[in-house]
Amino acid sequence: MKKIAFLAAMLAVTAAGMAHAEERRILVDATGTVQAAPDMATITLGVTNEDPQASNAMQATSDAVAQILKRLEDMGVESRDVQTRDLSLSPVWSGRNNQSGERPEISGFVASNNVQVRVRDLTQLGTIMDGVIQDGANDFGGLSFGVQDPAPLQAQARAKAVAEATAKAEQLAQAANVTLGQVQQISERVGGINPAPQMRAMAMAEGGGVPVAGGEISVSVNVSMEFGMAE
């Protein structure tokens, strides 16, 4: 029994020592960011028409969108870069806020068709936007810039994040008068593509059209690293 108790005590001490050793870690977070010029833009545009007759409202909207799609094709935008995002037909009510108690009535209809377009030739962006407005686009839901292949930028941002995290860990180890050990664990979180704080002017409408500035975009990667350490 004494022998069993002794072994149990030794195991408890060993387990405590292992737990203590596992706790001897340096944990750091770091973010690497790379800025670059965009090579692609995504615009959301649409056509909205109102008419007393639902069919007329939808027909006018459809005709304008068909003309817009034809113009995009003629300007070299591929079909894979054009996608319908929303198609709707809604009644327009009159008399909803009257105080006479009369029932509201449908006075017309609103038809909308929204399309998302990726523009891979940014020199055409201003001209494209000008052209679709002429064709009847009267609803713009947004414009964002990006890159067609973010992987190389993510790799650069990842390398910067790891280098910064390692430098932080070395500084912490030196300040604590310990020796930095091997990497025990590492994880990452890739951020989105965002406009950079420092905007670089970039004319998009060389041949006229809507003036647009592309500026720069930034790609970020955050890493969490765990290092071992020794006295």
Image (tube, grey):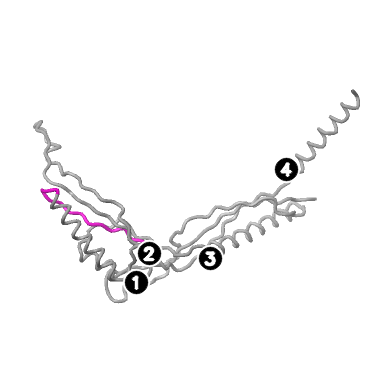
Find out whether residue 143 is within the magenta segment. no
Q: CA distance from mark 2 to mark 4?
A: 48 Å
Residue behind mark 3: 152
Q: Which residues are magenta?
A: 42-54
In the rendered structure, which disc, 1 or 3, sits on the residue that comes first in sequence? 3
Write down the residue under mark 2: 41
The N terminus, quarter of image: top right
The foreground one among 70 and 96 is 70
Point out the tag, 3 or 2, that comes first from the N-terminus: 2
| Mark 4 residue type | Glu
Mark 4 residue element: helix
Q: Earlier in the sequence, mark 2 or mark 1?
A: 2
Nearest to viewer (mark 2 / mark 1): 2
**Label 2 vs 4, first from the N-terminus:** 4
Q: Which residue is mark 4?
A: 23
Marking on residue 204 = 1
